[in-house]
Each structure stands twice: as structure tokens, then as C-alpha cells.
Image (spheres, grey):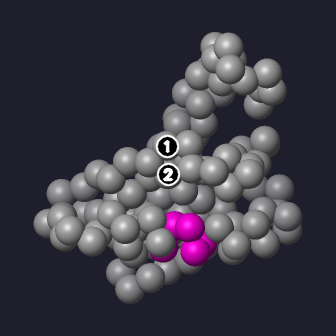
Amino acid sequence: MATTACFIIVSRNDIPIYEAEVGSATKREDAAQLHQFILHAALDIVQDIAWTTSAMFLKAIDRFNDLVVSVYVTAGHTRLMLLHDSRNDDGIKSFFQEVHELYIKLMQDSPCHSTKE
């Protein structure tokens, strides 16, 4: 089974902090741009949903063809977004929680950031 995944971290000011294309699916030339477009288009949906729930893991918030956008919002409103084609909510939630823990450690150790989550 071929899998596609694009992971992106977006700051509370809608500035991409990190992006990674991963997966075993055949890569097309324009796939990275398409993935970026899908994820950035989902930011408005994330903004609307984030204010209506106290949950950090928002699950699948948007779809495009066979691709699904799952989101995790930190307390500081940083968005961890994953574009994927597989259905595994528990695994995705665990991935987001681990990334969030690493993100907090990184921010605590960073001399550039004065605000901590």
C-alpha cells in the first residue's frame, strides 16, 4: 500500500516553521506544491474549529480526493498539520503528541524564543 504524508508546523501567525514530505507513494513533480496548497487551504477551517472545542487533536478536518488533513493545535495556537491518505486516528494522535512534546522541549531550550508553551 502506497502512503503519502506531508507534515507541517504553522505558527500562530500563519508562518510555516517546518515542513516534511514523507511516504512511499510515487512522487510527482507537483506533489509538494499540491500538498502545501491543501494544507494552507485548511488553515481557515482549523481557525474556525479551534475556537469551538477544547480538544487539541482535531482529527480529520478536511479532505481533498483521497487525502485527509488531520490537525493538532497546541496551547500557544501552533498548528501541527498532517496530510495523509491512510486512516489511523490513534497512530496519528500519538504522532502529534510526540511531536508536541519535542516541540515544547525545543522551545524551552531555544534562546530565540522568550515565550514558552
- Circle 1 SS class: strand
Residue 43 numbered tag: none
Local packing at callout 2 (Cα closer than 10 Å; few below 14, some 14-19, many 20+) is many
Q: Residue at x 39, y 57 (%)?
A: 6
Q: Mark 1 or mark 2, which has the lower sequence index?
A: 2
84 versus 79 height, above or below: below
| Quarter of the image that includes the C terminus | top right
Task: Say which quarter of the image contains residue 47.
Answer: bottom right
Identify the residue at image location x=45%, y=65%.
Answer: 36
Decide which of 94, 73 is in the foreground and name it: 73
Is residue 56 positioned above or below 112 on the image?
below
Which residue is tagged 2? 8
Task: Say whether residue 40 is left or right of residue 77.
Answer: left
Q: Is residue 4 left or right of residue 57?
A: left
Inspect the magenta stretch and tell me whether residue 3 lies in it: no
Q: Which one is nearer the viewer's eye here, 72 or 110?
A: 110
Magenta stretch: give its range: 38-42
Mark 1 surroundings within 10 Å by alpha-carbon count, few (fewer than 14), some (14 through 19), many (20 or more): few
Callout 1, which amino acid? Answer: Tyr
Type of secondary structure dominating the magenta stretch:
helix
Identify which amino acid the numbered label 2 is placed on.
Answer: Ile
The percent position of residue 21, horizontal first and vertical second, equals 32, 53
Where residue 88 appears, x then y in whole percent?
42, 61
- Compute the Cα span from label 1 to label 2: 5 Å
Identify the disc placed on residue 18.
1
Q: Is residue 39 magenta?
A: yes
Q: Are marks 1 and 2 in contact (CB under 8 Å)?
A: yes
| Corner quadrant of residue 102 | top right
When the figure is inspected, residue 18 is found, relative to residue 113, above or below; the finding is: below
Any part of residue 92 in sight: no
